[in-house]
Every structure is written in structure tokens, then in C-alpha cells.
């Protein structure tokens, strides 16, 4: 079979160009990435050999070898892991199918030095080899197969794959080093890199010189070692390895569970969002080991989906080595481990939130939206803990606020936890719905994540006996709340009530006229107690779908038509008073009809909605301006 030459996919070519030409200050990390990949290959084969021992019958001692040829200026790294087929070479090294390169390219900024630092976050560490090499050869043979394959590329746009002889399974990567990369031929330099970045790799990493082999790392599972023997740098480098990441861990949780079920846990919370955090599959990346043998990095149910940002290892002593993925999902031991791991992580997050609120705010900005998924999906024992961990932006605070802090600050007479949902904090702060609440100093939660529409509907019973209530639905219930007017005398309050009753009587004819003019485009027209500055706003009636949820469903084609809303009118606004006077004087013609539709369109604009008839809106606005200028 002849060699086949192919072009890299466009995204891969773009990535390789950045990598090869970036002035990267720590080029040595290429060795970490290649060793990490080799360790993964050994891990996978060790797992496959549990059910098929023949795969490792010829060589069961896993090892990663490094050798340097100063004369040829080549650095070679080999493993006796699972190896690759021809198809896997194309998929893994030539396309975006499994490399994550597409997501990487989406993040490219044009700053080569900055962009290269993202490589590890997107699982494309193999390409870092081109930082030090102008030609890379990958000779590989899949375990259990007889045919080997040679992948070759200079990283400039094309690669070739050809059949090749290889006596044993595994992969050999040969780097033809650039002129300025000769330092990576020196044993001492390589030893320093391995001990710095890969000391935790659970397989021997050896330097080969002729017949001699010198082990460069400790080759022990880091998670089984006592915490007193592990430095912060050790943890950091293990996180880089297990998470294929370049950022530092925000939090490290390392413990050993003893008792009826024994397991080790070493988990990390990243400081930056992983690129696939909101992928539809919502997969986690915590690896499951049994007695130090890698089983899978895709164990459904090991950690809940709302903790899928975690990276790390769970190593259990009480599961059989030959357990299948299907049996794992139903295994009661795994279910107990999952519950215990979740409890442990949430507990550590709670400690962080209490002791270091500013640091916790950084975590919440990155992963809060994912954590809130648990309020909707977790039917176990963790919902109350989650409620204590969630944080909110509010109308009364520049800092993130917990529900405990919110309830402590509730006004006398306030019976509900008020919230509003929208696209952004800034838009919500400008919403007319919060005007009355601000005037009385009543705090409102500002919710702007897509999941907010769903988890809050599942909060039956509320928090500490206080129900959650949307301020864009139903009555505002502000009359019973003692706010800015709490120091008024009974006589003052009686006078206010008398004036309000008179204003309601005066406004009634206008409300009826507006309802008649707008017809079925609104459900009702009512006097508002929540508005102080704006003339009108739209609300959902009690029992109707919340406005933002309806908008979200329509955007995703889950709902065809908008539900008619209630138009609330601010009787104290100058425009409304003027219209009321016109109605009282019997002036209810076309001008009132135009005014009614302009007010409705204004309310829609304030909600961030599209005006259904822009041409009619423009005509009415021009006519109103013309009449106003003519006065």
C-alpha cells in the first residue's frame, strides 16, 4: 500500500501555524504533553487487557522511554500503550474530530503568544511538538493488530500516512529538532523537565542511553501518597496532566475515605472555564480507577452534571477490575461514592464561600450557571446545600449575595423573595418593573442565566419558608412592605390612601379606553403600584408563564405565539395624567388610539422585545412629535 498524503483541515493548519511561530516562553511543556498522551495510551491498554489479557501477553510492564540522538538532532519518545490504527491517526492528528481544535480556533484572538497558551485547555497538546521540531514522525501499531503505520508532517499544511514495520505495539514519536532547540537533547535538561512536570505519572519515564535506562520520575499514583509528601507544585502539575489544562487549579480536594467503602479522591476545580463546559453532552472529566488501574474517564453518574467542571481522579478499592461501563451505572458502590464525593466537594465549596468570599465570587462568575443546574436536576440530599452556595447580583448590593444574607435584610411585611429574570444584569437594573421596589428599598434578585427560568420553577417551598416571586408577574404586593414611607404617621397614611382612591377613580375611564383601543393585544389594562418613573410596563398575569421564559421558548421554537400580557399604567406619570384628562373631556378619537399603541410598544421595547409593526410605530411616533412641536 502506497503512502497517502492529505492536507490538514483548515482549523488544524491555522493552529499549527500559530504554534510553530509563537514566541512561547515555556517551550519545554511540549514534553509534558507528549508524556501525558503516552501515559493515557498505557492506561487505556491496561484497562482493555483486563478483559483481553492477550493484548499485553508479550509485554505487561508499561513504560515510557525517552532517547536523544545528538548526531541526528532527534528526540524520541516511545510507549508500549494501546497504539493507533490508520483511521485513528487521521482522526487524532489530522482533523478536528477528536482534538478539540475547532473550539480552540473559535477562541483565537490573533495574539500568537496568548493563543498558544490556550493549547492545553483544548486537548491539542500533541501539536505543541511543532514548537521545538520542524518535522515530526509518529510510528504506531495498535495492540492486537499486526500492521504498523507511519504519520509524518512538517506542520506546514500536509501530512502523510503509510504502512510501516513495527515489531511491537505502541507508539514512537520522533522529533527532528529545530536549530534553537538543541537543549532538549541534553539528559540533565530532560530530567529536570520530567521531574518538574511529570513526576506524578504512574508509569516509569526512563531515559535510554544504549543499554542503560535511568528512571526520571517517581512513577507512583500521586493520589495514594500522603498529603504531607505532596507540594503545591506537585498538585498543580498533576492537574495539568489529568485536566489537560494550562491554568492553575482554583481549589484542590484530596482525601481518603475509609470504612465500608474505601477510595481515594483527588479533585480540582479549574480557575478558568473548560471550553466544553456547556457542550450538549455535559460530560464530566473525572477519571475512575480501581486499585490504581484506569477504568474510564466517561463514567456516567460518578459526579453529577452540575459538577462537570471538576477534573481529577477517584480510585476505588471496592469495585471489580473487570466491571463493565453498563454495570458501573447500576453499581450501588459507585452510587454511594458519587453521593459522598458530591457531599465532599459541596462542603469544601461552602468553606471557601465562608472564609474567602472574594475568591468564591471568582468561582461563581465562572461556574455559577452550572451549579444552578443542580437546583433543577438534583433530587437527592444536596439541594439544601446547593441553595446555601448559590449567589446573586441584586438591586441593593454591588457584591454577590447569598439567600441567607437576602432574607436577613428583608423588609418588615415582606413575605416573598423577589426576583427578575432577563438577559443581563445591566438590562435588569434598567427595567421599569423594579422602580417601586427600589423606591421602598426592597431588594430584588437579578437573574440572567438561561437556567434561571427553570430551576426557580422547581423551588417548591422556597427558601426558609419564603417563596420566590417574580416581579414581572401578578401584583407587586408592595402595600404591606414598610419601606421609605415606614416612618409616616397614621394620619399621613390615611391621607395618602384617600388620594390614591381619588386618583384610581379619575383614571378608571382612561384604563377602559386603553383596553378598548388595544383589544386582544393585551390581556388587561390595570393601575400599577410598581412603577414610579416609567408610564407603563408589561407583566404576566397570575398563573401565566413568566415573560422571560416565554421569550426563551419562542426563541427556541418551542412556542409559536406570544401570550397577551397585562399592561400596567403609572397613574402618577405626566403622560398618563394628560391622557386621563383628555378622556375625561371626551377626547377619545384617533389620537388616543395612537397613544395607546405607542404606550404598548414602549412597554415592549423596555422588555427587549421586537415591535410587531415598526412601520405603524414610526408613523404614530412622527404624528405625536408633530402634534407636540405644533403646540
Image: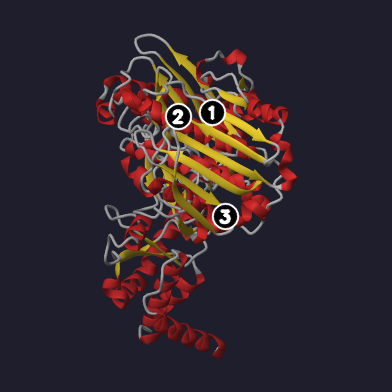
Q: Quadrant of the C terminus?
A: bottom right
The residue tagged 1 is 64
Inter-mark Cα distance, 3 to 1: 27 Å
Between residue 339 and residue 513, name the one nearer to us: 339
Position above or below: 53 against 40: above
Q: Residue at x 25, y 27 (%)?
A: 327
Q: Residue at x 61, y 14 (%)?
A: 229
Residue neighbourhood size for the residue with mark 1, other residues' Cα within 10 Å, grouped as few (<14), some (14–19), many (≥20): many
Between residue 142 and residue 396, name the one nearer to us: 142
Identify the disc placed on residue 42. Answer: 2
Mark 1, secondary structure of its residue? strand
The residue tagged 3 is 15
Q: Earlier in the sequence, mark 1 or mark 2?
A: 2
Where residue 462 appears, x then y in whole percent? 36, 36
Colour scheme of this structure image? Answer: secondary structure
Asked if one can make out residue 383 in the rendered structure from this viewpoint, the answer is: yes
Amino acid at each position: 500500500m502506497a503512502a497517502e498524503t492529505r492536507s490538514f483541515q483548515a482549523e488544524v493548519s491555522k493552529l499549527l501555524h500559530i504554534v510553530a511561530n509563537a514566541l512561547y516562553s515555556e517551550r519545554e511543556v511540549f514534553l509534558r504533553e507528549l508524556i501525558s498522551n503516552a501515559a493515557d495510551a498505557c492506561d487505556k491498554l491496561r484497562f482493555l487487557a483486563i478483559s483481553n489479557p492477550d493484548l499485553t501477553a508479550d509485554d505487561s510492564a508499561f513504560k515510557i522511554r525517552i532517547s536523544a540522538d545528538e548526531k541526528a538532532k532527534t528526540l524520541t519518545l516511545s510507549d508500549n500503550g494501546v497504539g493507533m490504527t490508520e483511521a485513528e491517526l487521521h482522526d487524532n492528528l489530522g482533523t478536528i474530530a477528536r482534538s478539540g481544535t475547532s473550539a480552540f480556533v473559535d477562541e483565537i484572538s490573533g495574539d500568537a503568544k496568548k493563543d498558544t497558551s490556550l493549547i492545553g485547555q483544548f486537548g491539542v497538546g500533541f501539536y505543541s511538538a511543532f514548537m521545538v521540531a520542524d518535522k515530526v514522525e509518529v510510528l504506531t501499531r495498535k495492540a492486537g493488530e499486526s500492521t504498523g503505520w507511519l504519520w509524518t508532517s512538517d506542520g506546514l499544511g500536509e501530512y502523510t500516512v503509510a504502512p510501516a514495520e513495527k515489531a511491537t505495539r505502541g507508539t514512537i514519536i520522533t522529533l527532528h529538532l529545530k536549530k534553537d532547540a538543541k537543549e532538549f537533547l541534553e539528559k540533565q535538561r530532560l530530567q529536570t523537565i520530567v521531574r518538574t512536570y511529570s513526576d506524578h505519572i504512574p508509569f516509569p519515564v526512563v531515559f535510554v542511553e544504549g543499554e542503560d535506562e535511568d528512571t526520571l520520575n517517581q512513577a507512583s499514583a500521586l493520589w495514594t501518597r500522603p498529603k504531607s509528601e505532596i507540594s503545591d507544585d506537585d498538585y498543580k502539575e498533576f492537574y495539568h496532566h489529568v485536566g489537560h489544562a494550562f491554568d492553575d487549579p482554583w481549589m484542590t480536594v484530596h482525601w481518603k475515605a475509609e470504612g465500608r467503602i474505601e477510595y481515594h479522591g483527588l479533585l480540582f476545580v479549574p480557575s478558568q472555564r473548560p471550553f466544553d463546559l456547556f457542550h450538549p453532552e455535559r460530560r464530566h472529566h473525572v477519571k475512575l480507577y480501581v486499585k490504581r488501574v484506569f477504568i474510564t474517564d466517561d463514567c456516567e453518574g460518578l459526579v453529577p452534571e452540575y459538577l462537570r467542571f471538576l477534573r481529577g481522579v477517584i480510585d476505588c478499592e471496592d469495585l471489580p477490575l473487570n466491571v463493565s461501563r453498563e454495570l458501573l451505572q447500576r453499581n450501588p458502590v459507585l452510587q454511594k461514592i458519587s453521593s459522598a464525593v458530591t457531599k465532599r466537594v459541596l462542603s469544601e465549596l461552602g468553606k471557601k464561600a465562608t472564609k474567602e468570599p472574594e475568591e468564591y465570587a471568582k468561582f461563581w462568575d465562572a461556574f455559577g450557571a452550572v451549579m444552578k443546574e443542580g437546583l433543577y436536576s438534583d433530587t437527592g440530599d444536596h439541594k439544601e446545600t446547593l441553595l446555601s452556595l448559590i449567589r446573586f447580583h441584586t438591586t441593593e448590593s454591588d457584591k454577590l449575595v447569598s439567600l441567607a444574607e437576602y432574607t436577613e435584610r428583608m423588609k418588615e411585611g415582606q413575605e416573598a423573595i423577589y426576583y427578575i429574570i432577563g438577559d443581563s444584569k445591566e438590562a435588569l437594573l434598567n427595567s421599569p418593573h423594579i422602580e417601586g421596589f427600589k423606591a421602598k428599598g426592597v431588594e430584588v434578585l437579578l437573574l440572567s442565566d438561561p437556567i434561571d427560568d427553570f430551576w426557580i420553577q422547581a423551588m417548591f417551598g422556597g427558601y426558609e419558608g419564603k417563596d420566590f416571586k417574580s416581579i414581572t408577574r401578578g401584583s407587586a404586593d408592595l402595600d404591606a412592605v414598610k419601606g421609605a414611607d415606614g416612618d409616616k404617621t397614621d394620619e399621613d397614611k390615611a391621607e395618602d390612601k384617600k388620594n390614591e382612591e381619588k386618583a384610581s377613580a379619575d383614571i378608571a375611564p382612561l384604563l377602559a379606553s386603553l383596553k378598548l383601543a388595544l383589544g386582544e393585544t393585551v390581556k388587561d389594562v390595570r393601575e400599577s403600584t410598581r412603577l414610579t418613573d416609567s408610564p407603563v410596563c408589561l407583566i404576566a398575569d397570575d398563573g401565566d408563564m413568566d415573560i422571560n421564559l416565554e421569550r426563551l421558548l419562542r426563541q427556541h421554537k418551542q412556542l409559536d405565539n406570544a401570550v397577551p400580557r397585562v399592561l400596567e399604567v403609572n397613574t402618577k406619570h405626566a403622560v398618563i395624567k394628560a391622557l386621563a384628562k383628555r378622556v375625561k373631556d371626551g377626547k377619545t378619537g384617533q389620537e388616543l388610539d395612537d397613544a395607546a399603541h405607542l404606550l404598548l410598544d414602549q412597554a415592549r421595547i423596555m422588555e427587549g422585545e421586537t415591535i410587531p409593526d415598526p412601520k405603524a410605530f414610526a408613523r404614530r411616533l412622527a404624528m405625536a412629535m408633530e402634534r407636540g412641536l405644533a403646540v
